[in-house]
């Protein structure tokens, strides 16, 4: 059997592909918010009105809108994606996202696929994909035109949700195609660089993973620098270039995001929450939480719970 014919029928016109994808996303996202799908790395988002900035962490992912538009800010740089432009995130990043085009009649509908790093690495090695001519500078995020072939593959992946028995066989094949098309696109340069063994970008990626794994413990930059075989000054400079935050600032974001998650899930003892995410001082936790999220911890959690009912 020719699997390529099975997985990749002739591509529809861009407009019809977007229309089909929007219908699928809307059907599997009946209310506003985030919706996980039967394809584990694939998530849909729906919003019926423009939104205020929302703080979140983005995984390594391909993101674009099947309808509407959104603006993402990482550090002091902003990126817009919509039906013609996609976003490729090549390192786990704290971002602020704001839906800028949405209405009840035409809600914002988002396709977000977390990219499998192990599979991407295998593709780089097996297909001998060259690294970029120079290590890309700036945050590990890139926005650019959404290629027709990438849109077609995304549409075919989403279409599998209507035939669940096909997902175990066909979803991995289409995900591999999507990753390949991302890697070979103009937005894939930083991701390719991150997958090159011992490149500067891959070292920062390892540093990010280490900070995530030890976010509640005191952070010693000399230990982190030694872990990724960099000097402290080089680590600090390149970490901030890739994530828009210093390692300590990144750790603080992780702590506050985790605290917010616990409060949204019903935790009520601020002292316990603060200690669990690494704060020795409750007053410092309260102060930094309010500075980031704009409201005291419990007030913020109550508002978020109410909005998501």
Image (cartoon, grey):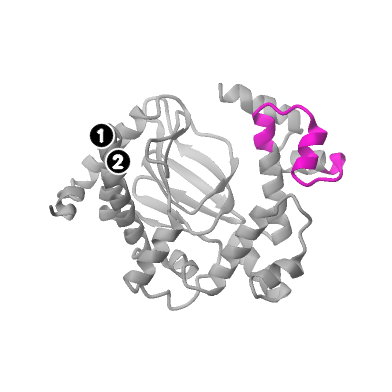
Q: Is residue 133 shown left or right of residue 206?
A: left
Residue 156: x percent and y percent? 26, 44
Q: Is residue 237 shown left or right of residue 5?
A: right
Does residue 71 appear anywhere in the picture?
yes
Question: What secondary structure characterizes most of the magenta part?
Answer: helix
Residue position marked by numbered label 2 in the rendering: 167
Q: Is residue 236 shown left or right of residue 146?
A: right
Marker disc for residue 177: none
Q: Going 59% across and 44% down the picture, which residue do you hit?
A: 56
Q: Nearer the viewer, residue 79 or 121?
A: 121
**In which image quadrant can residue 139 be found?**
bottom right
Please report the bounds of the magenta region as a residue range: 260-284
Residue position marked by numbered label 1 in the rendering: 163
For label 1, the SS is loop
Q: Nearer the viewer, residue 181 or 276?
A: 276
Residue 44: x percent and y percent? 42, 37
**Magenta segment includes 294:** no
Residue 105: x percent and y percent? 37, 25
Q: Going 76% across and 36% down the picture, which residue do you hit?
A: 273
């Amino acid at each position: 059997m020719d699997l390529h014919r099975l997985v990749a029928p002739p591509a529809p016109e861009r407009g019809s592909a977007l229309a089909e994808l929007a219908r699928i996303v809307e059907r599997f996202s009946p209310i506003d918010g985030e919706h996980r799908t039967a394809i584990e790395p694939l998530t849909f988002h729906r919003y019926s009105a423009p939104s205020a900035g929302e703080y979140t962490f983005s995984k390594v992912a391909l993101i674009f809108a099947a309808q509407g538009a959104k603006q993402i800010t990482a550090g002091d740089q902003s990126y817009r994606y919509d039906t013609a432009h996609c976003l490729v995130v090549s390192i786990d990043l704290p971002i602020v996202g704001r839906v800028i085009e949405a209405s009840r009649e035409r809600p914002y509908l988002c396709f977000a696929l977390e990219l499998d790093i192990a599979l991407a690495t295998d593709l780089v090695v097996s297909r001998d994909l060259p690294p970029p001519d120079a290590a890309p500078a700036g945050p590990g995020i890139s926005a650019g035109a959404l290629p027709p072939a990438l849109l077609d593959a995304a549409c075919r992946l989403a279409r599998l949700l209507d035939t669940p028995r096909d997902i175990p066989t066909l979803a991995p094949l289409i995900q591999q195609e999507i990753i390949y098309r991302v890697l070979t696109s103009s937005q894939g340069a930083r991701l390719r660089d991150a997958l090159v063994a011992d490149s500067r970008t891959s070292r920062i990626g390892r540093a990010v993973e280490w900070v995530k794994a030890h976010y509640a413990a005191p952070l010693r930059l000399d230990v982190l620098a030694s872990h990724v075989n960099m000097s402290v000054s080089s680590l600090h400079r390149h970490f901030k270039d890739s994530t828009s935050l210093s390692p300590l600032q990144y750790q603080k974001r992780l702590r506050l995001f985790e605290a917010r998650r616990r409060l949204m899930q019903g935790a009520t003892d601020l002292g316990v929450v603060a200690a669990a995410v690494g704060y020795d001082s409750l007053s410092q936790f309260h102060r930094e939480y309010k500075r980031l999220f704009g409201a005291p911890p419990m007030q913020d959690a109550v508002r978020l719970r109410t909005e998501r009912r």
